[in-house]
Amino acid sequence: MALGMNDAMTHNFMGIALGNLGQVQEAVAAYRKALEFKKDYHQARLNLSFALLKVGQTEEAKKEFARLCQQNARLCEQYRQYFPQQ
C-alpha cells in the first residue's frame, strides 16, 4: 500500500510524530486532516480527543470522544475513564 500526503493514515502518523515532538496544536491539525480523508478513522479521532485535552480544549475533546463512542463502542469503553462525563 502506497502512502502519500493525501492519505488518512499518513496524517494520523504525522499527528503522532508532531505530538511526540511537543507540537500538539500541529498534531491536532494533522488528526483533523486524517478525519477529512476518512471520517470513521477511529484511531485518529481518539488521538484527536487526547490532543485536544492536552491543549486545554476540554469541551471539544469531549465532543470528539462522543463521536468516537457513536462509531466504536469498544474503544469508547476502553478509554472512557479519561472522559468521565461521557
Image (tube, grey):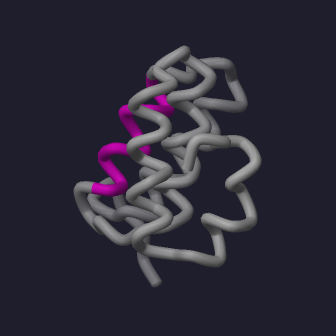
Is residue 20 toward the left or the right of residue 9 in the image? right
Q: Position of residue 25 (x, y in %)?
A: 47, 20
**Front residue of this view, candidates 67 and 85:** 85
Q: Would you place residue 70 above or below residue 18 in this image?
A: below
Residue at (52, 42) in percent of width and height: 49
Residue at (36, 71) in percent of width and height: 40
Outermost residue to the front: 85
**Secondary structure, magenta segment, majority class:** helix
Residue 37 painted magenta = no
Magenta segment: 26-35
Name the quadrant containing residue 85. top right
**Front residue of this view, candidates 43 and 20:** 43
Q: Position of residue 44 (x, y in %)?
A: 49, 56
Residue at (46, 84) in percent of width and height: 1
Is residue 10 toward the left or the right of residue 21 in the image? left
Q: Would you place residue 29 above or below residue 74 in this image?
A: above
Name the quadrant containing residue 50. top right
**Front residue of this view, candidates 25 and 67:** 67
Residue at (25, 63) in percent of width and height: 37
Is residue 30 toward the left or the right of residue 78 in the image? left
Q: Would you place residue 44 above or below residue 55 in this image?
A: below
**Front residue of this view, candidates 63 and 85:** 85
Name the quadrant containing residue 26. top left
Outermost residue to the bottom: 1
Residue 34 painted magenta = yes
Number of numbered discs present?
0
